[in-house]
Image (cartoon, grey):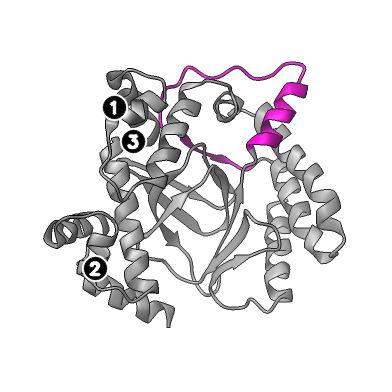
């Protein structure tokens, strides 16, 4: 099944003239394919609740202090929006890295869980809202059929929902169901922290009031700090800082904004402090990083 899934993805890319490296979107929001013929330096992004599958090669993703590595036919499941640094650690021209990201639909997950005769119970593990596992044959088959839908333009609108329900079924009945179900449990710690994260993401350029975030999560200040750090491996201020640095990086690379302007645009009051934080996060000074990133794009 692993080889047939990889062939389906390769055929999809080749059939659309996507022979080069890059991130390739599909006609459905939330399903993307990436192919890279070499190792990469750390790339910053915000992960949505999603299923991230590696078909060939290997990848490493860093969420705060937590690092997750996974290789061929492994997947990373993210349960809450989090900024992260990811890098491809194994790839070559002969055997490029090939990966798929699929956003999870909380509505479909919730609907499927209500129809299970024995719905999963949440695990007692209070760790970060991310885990790595091997892709089962059932999940691999679902993803293969999902990719094959694009061979027929009439198929995706009709068959996509059914295959997504099947994917949710296997996730909710698999060995990690106790973690997956936390995505849709009402009034869970994950859901309440996620509400605070939504507010923080929408206002990350502004000064953050932790008391306000705790109130949104309906938790005491100490409880909110504990659950936020456990779930994301970051404090709320660290989370906000990473959002600011990622957005500043995007502004400098994509919109040709200089370092000082980018710093102030994302909420920093000091360009020098911004540069220090940038180096600590990305391991390189902003100007040099932007030059290297632009040369890679070109």
Above or below 80: residue 86: below
- Residue pictured at 29% horizontal, 57% vertical: 266
- Residue pictured at 57% horizontal, 78% vertical: 20
Residue at which label 3 appears: 233
| Disc 3 to disc 1: CB gap under 8 Å | no
Q: Residues within 10 Å of mark 1 (few under 14, many from 20)?
A: some
Q: Position of residue 148 (x, y in %)?
A: 79, 59
Q: Nearer the viewer, residue 266 or 144?
A: 266
What is the quadrant of residue 238 in the picture? Answer: top left
Left or right: where does residue 88 sit relative to residue 222? Answer: right
Q: Secondary structure at mark 3?
A: loop
Q: Residues within 10 Å of mark 2 (few under 14, many from 20)?
A: some
The CA distance from mark 3 to mark 2 is 29 Å
- Residue pictured at 81% horizontal, 56% vertical: 156
The CA distance from mark 2 to mark 1 is 30 Å
| Disc 3 to disc 2: CB gap under 8 Å | no
Q: Looking at this rendering, what residue extends furthest in the bottom direction? A: 298
**What's the magenta region?**
106-135
Give the mark nearest the N terminus, 2 or 1.
Answer: 1
Give the mark nearest the N terminus, 3 or 2.
Answer: 3
Left or right: where does residue 286 sit relative to residue 8? Answer: left
Left or right: where does residue 18 sit relative to residue 257? Answer: right
Residue at which label 1 appears: 211
Residue at which label 2 appears: 261
Above or below 203: residue 126: above
Give the mark nearest the N terminus, 3 or 1.
Answer: 1
Q: Secondary structure at mark 1?
A: helix
Q: Secondary structure at mark 2?
A: helix
């Amino acid at each position: 099944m692993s080889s047939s899934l990889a062939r389906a993805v390769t055929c999809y890319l080749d059939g659309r003239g996507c022979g080069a490296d890059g991130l390739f979107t599909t006609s459905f929001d939330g399903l993307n394919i990436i192919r890279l013929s070499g190792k990469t330096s750390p790339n910053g992004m915000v992960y949505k609740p999603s299923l991230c599958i590696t078909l060939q090669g290997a990848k490493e993703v860093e969420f705060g202090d937590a690092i997750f590595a996974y290789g061929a036919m492994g997947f990373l499941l993210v349960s809450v929006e989090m900024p992260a640094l990811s890098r491809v650690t194994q790839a070559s021209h002969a055997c490029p890295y090939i990966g798929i990201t699929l956003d999870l639909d909380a509505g479909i997950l919730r609907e499927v869980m209500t129809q299970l005769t024995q719905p999963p119970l949440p695990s007692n593990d209070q760790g970060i809202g991310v885990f790595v596992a091997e892709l089962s044959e059932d999940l691999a088959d679902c993803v293969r059929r999902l990719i094959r839908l694009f061979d027929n333009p009439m198929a995706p609108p009709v068959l996509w929902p059914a295959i997504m329900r099947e994917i949710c079924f296997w996730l909710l009945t698999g060995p990690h169901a106790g973690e997956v179900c936390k995505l849709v449990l009402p009034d869970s710690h994950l859901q309440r922290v996620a509400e605070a994260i939504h507010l923080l993401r929408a206002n990350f350029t502004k000064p953050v009031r932790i008391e306000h975030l705790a109130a949104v999560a309906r938790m005491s200040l100490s409880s909110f700090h504990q659950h936020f750090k456990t779930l994301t491996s970051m404090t709320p201020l660290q989370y906000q800082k990473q959002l600011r640095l990622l957005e500043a990086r995007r502004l400098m690379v994509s919109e040709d904004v200089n370092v000082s302007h980018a710093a102030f645009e994302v909420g920093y009051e000091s360009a020098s402090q911004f540069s220090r934080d940038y180096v600590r996060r990305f391991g390189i000074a902003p100007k040099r990083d932007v030059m290297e990133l632009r040369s890679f794009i070109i």
